[in-house]
Image (spheres, rainbow, N blue to C red):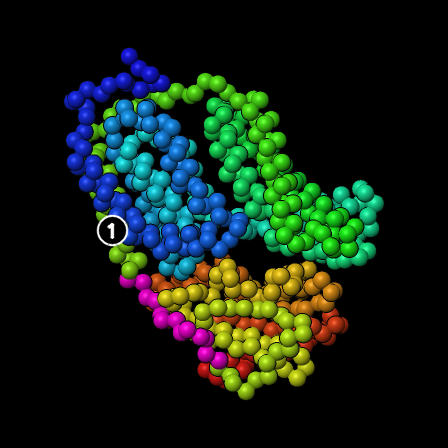
Amino acid sequence: MTQHGMPLSTPLTQQRPILPFTLLLTSLTALYLLVFWPTLQSMELIWRHSETYMHGYLIAPISLWLLYRQRQQLSRLQPEPTVLPAILALPLLLIWLLAYSININFVSQFAAVFYLQLLIWSLLGHRFMRYCWFPIGFLIFLVPFGEAANPVLQQITADLVVAMLQLINMPVYRDGLYLHTASAVFEVAVACSGLNFLLSSLVLSCLFAYLHYQRLYKAVLFIALVLLLSILANGIRAFLLVVIGEKSQMAYGFGADHYYYGWLVFFIVMFCSFWLGAKFSDDNPAQAAEVPPATSRSFKLAAIALVLPLSLAGLLSKTLPAEATPETAAPLFSSMTPPDTRAPWGIQFYDGLSRDHWQSSEGVEFFYATYANRQQQGDLITWHNTLFNLEHWSIRHARREGALLQSYGVLELVNPQGQVREVQFWYQLGSYQTNSRVMFKLLQLKFLWLQRPEAAEVFAVSSMQPEPLSRQQQLEQARHTLQQTIANER
C-alpha cells in the first residue's frame, strides 16, 4: 500500500545503516562551512547593511518550515546518496574558486548556494528532491541579486510618474531622472527604483504559488502578475509622493512618512494579489513518483565525488595570495591643491594601497588610486567604490571611447541644480586599460593565475566647464597629463 506515491514502510533489507550516512553528513557540513565561510559572510554583510536584502535572514527559516510541514512524508524516506548531482556540482566549485579569487561576490555567492542545493540532492537522493525541490530551491533567495536592474527600474518609475502627472495636468519637465515641477525638483534615485518591492514580491509570490498551486501555468501567471503590479505600485507610490510634496510645498511626503507611504502601498498590493490568487488555488497536492533506491556503490561514489573536490577547492582557496591592506591609503603626492567642495564630485574608492585627489588651477579634478591585484581587504571593483556621489549626481549620458582593452569611459552627470559635470575614467592593469568592470575582472583573473603581481589602478578626471566642447578639450588634455604624471612617479 502506498500514500502519495511512497511506501508506508521500507523493508529492512533496503534500510541503510545510519552511522556511515551520519558521518558523511557531518563531515560535508563542516567542510562546506569551512570552504564557503568567507562567501557566506559576504552575503550576511549585505543583508545587514541593505534594506533591499534584509529578507535574506528569513529564507533559511522559511525553507526549514516548509520541510517541517512535510515531516510525516519525509520520515518514511531513507537517505539514498546519488552521484549525478555531485558530478553536476564540480563545475560550480571551479566557478566559485575563480570568482572568489578575484572577489566577484555575486558569482561566488550564487555558486556557493547552487553547490549547497546539489550537495543536499546528492546526499539525500532523488526521492527526497521530488518532494522537497521547492524548499531547497527557495534557498536561491539567500543570494543578494538584482542591483543591475536599478537603472532600468528607475527609468520605468520616472516614465510612470511623468505619465500620471500629465494625466492630472500637473506641469512637469523631465531631465534624465530629475523631474522639475512648479515648486521643486524631484529625483528618481536608486532608492526609488522599487527593487526592494520587486524582490520582496518575487519571494512572497513564489512562496504563495508553491503553497496554493499545482499547475505550472497558474504559478507562472500569478508570479508574473504580482511582479507587474509591484512595478506599477512603485510608480504610483512615487507619483503620490510628488503630488503630496508639490501640494504641501514639501511639508509632507519626504520625511519618515516617505518610508511609511511606500510600505503601505506595498502591503495593499500584496494583500490584493494574495486575495485574488487564493480564488484560483488548487486543492489536491501533487503526487511524487517512485524512484528506485540507491545502491551501496552509489553511496561510495557520491561520498568520493563530494568530499575530494570540496577539500581540493578549500585547499586551493587558502593558497591564494593576498597583500596586506594599509589602514589608510597613502597619497603619492602631498603638494597638490585639494578639490573644491562647493559642488563635490564625490568619487570614492576605499581600502586602496594609495589614493590621490587634487585640482588644477583651471578647475579640473584628478583622481588616482592603486590596489593590489588581490588584497586582504577590499578590491578596486566593488559595490561601494563609485565614480561619483550617487546621491548628488545622476548619469545623463555614458559612452566608451577606444577599443575595449585600450578604452576609457565618459560620463555626463547632472545634479538637481542643473549643474553638469563630465567624468573620463579607466581602470588599468599592466598595459591594458578599460572602462569595462567585467573586462577588468577578467584581466585580474588572468594576471592572478599567471602570477603577475601588477598593481590595479583607477584613473579619473572631471570638469564642470559649462561649454561642452571646451570641457571635452580640457578633459582630453587632463587625461594625458594624469597619465604622464603617474608615469613620471613610477
Name the image quarter holding the N terminus: top left
Query: Residue 310 at x, y = what percent?
Result: 27, 49
Q: Tell me which corner region of the image, top left, top right, bottom left or bottom right, holds residue 233.
A: top right
Q: Is residue 212 left or right of residue 260?
A: left
Question: Please, what secondary structure does the residue beneath circle 1 have?
Answer: helix
> At x 66% / y 54%, what residue is drawn?
255
Q: Is residue 322 magenta?
A: yes
Q: Tell me which corner region of the image, top left, top right, bottom left or bottom right, holds residue 100.
A: bottom left
Q: Is residue 343 left or right of residue 317?
A: right
User: Residue 380: in sight, yes or no?
Assistant: yes
Name the image quarter holding the C terminus: bottom left
- Which amino acid, mark 1? Ser
Seen in the picture, residue 394 relative to 422 is either above or below; the reply is: above
What is the span of residues highlighted in magenta in the rendered image?
A: 319-331
Query: Residue 486 at x, y = what percent?
Result: 51, 80
Toward the viewer: 355 or 447? Answer: 355
What residue does disc 1 label? 311
Query: Residue 163 at x, y = what percent?
Result: 76, 44
Toward the viewer: 372 or 79? Answer: 79
Query: Residue 160 at x, y = what percent?
Result: 71, 44
Q: Tell me which corner region of the image, top left, top right, bottom left or bottom right, holds residue 425.
A: bottom right
Seen in the picture, residue 77 relative to 36 is either above or below; the reply is: above
Seen in the picture, residue 218 relative to 152 is either above or below; the reply is: above
